[in-house]
Amino acid sequence: MGVSSDRFLRMADSLAEVERAKARDYLSFSVRGKRFGYHWPRTSTVGLKQTLSEQIALVAERPDVFEEQFTAGGFGWVVVHLPKIGVTELNELLYEAWRLSAPEELVEEHPLAGAAK
């Protein structure tokens, strides 16, 4: 188990119309100008947009893997510790984060089956 930062970056880049922005300590990921994720290489963590109910469930079920990051605009963001998560689960959470920010027509063109594994 565990996902490397390089693997995460390849997964994120495989999603449709992903835009990366580099800050001093992290990368952010957006689709058509709407943010859906962050990556902090130094700590091997990512922040992903989720529904509020999913944020609560993830943190409650596995606090060693997930942390509450913040809530905004009706969404709950979670910190994911890459060394403690499997590729399949991370792929699903990453896709969900992307889907929550992408326009409906783009989501319809790119279902989960087409996301990186």
Image (cartoon, grey):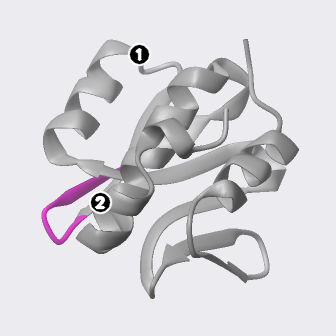
Q: Which residues are magenta?
A: 72-78
53 or 93: nearer the viewer: 93
Q: Residue at x 51, y 24 (%)?
A: 89
56 or 101: nearer the viewer: 101
Image quarter hosting the C terminus: top right
Q: Is 57 situated left or right of 96 in this image?
A: left
Q: CA distance from mark 1 to mark 2?
A: 22 Å
Placement of 37 over or under 51, stated as above or below: below
Task: List the residue tagged with mark 2.
Answer: 100
Q: Residue at x 73, y 45 (%)?
A: 8
Dot 1 or dot 2: first in sequence order is 1
User: Helix, strand, or loop for circle 1?
Assistant: loop
Please state the horizontal and vertical placement of residue 38, each as a whole percent of the image: 59, 62
Asked whether the viewer can see residue 25, the reply is yes
Task: List the residue tagged with mark 1.
Answer: 62
Return the mark for residue 17: none
Q: Amino acid at mark 1?
A: Arg
Q: Amino acid at mark 2?
A: Leu
Image quarter hosting the N terminus: top right
List the single residue furthest toward the bottom.
33
Q: Is 4 situated left or right of 26 in this image?
A: right
Please state the horizontal and vertical placement of residue 35, each as a whole percent of the image: 44, 74
57 or 102: nearer the viewer: 102
Q: Residue at x 52, y 61 (%)?
A: 37
Placement of 53 over or under 57, stated as above or below: below
Q: Main secondary structure of the magenta part?
A: strand
Please state the horizontal and vertical placement of residue 16, each as a whole percent of the image: 56, 66
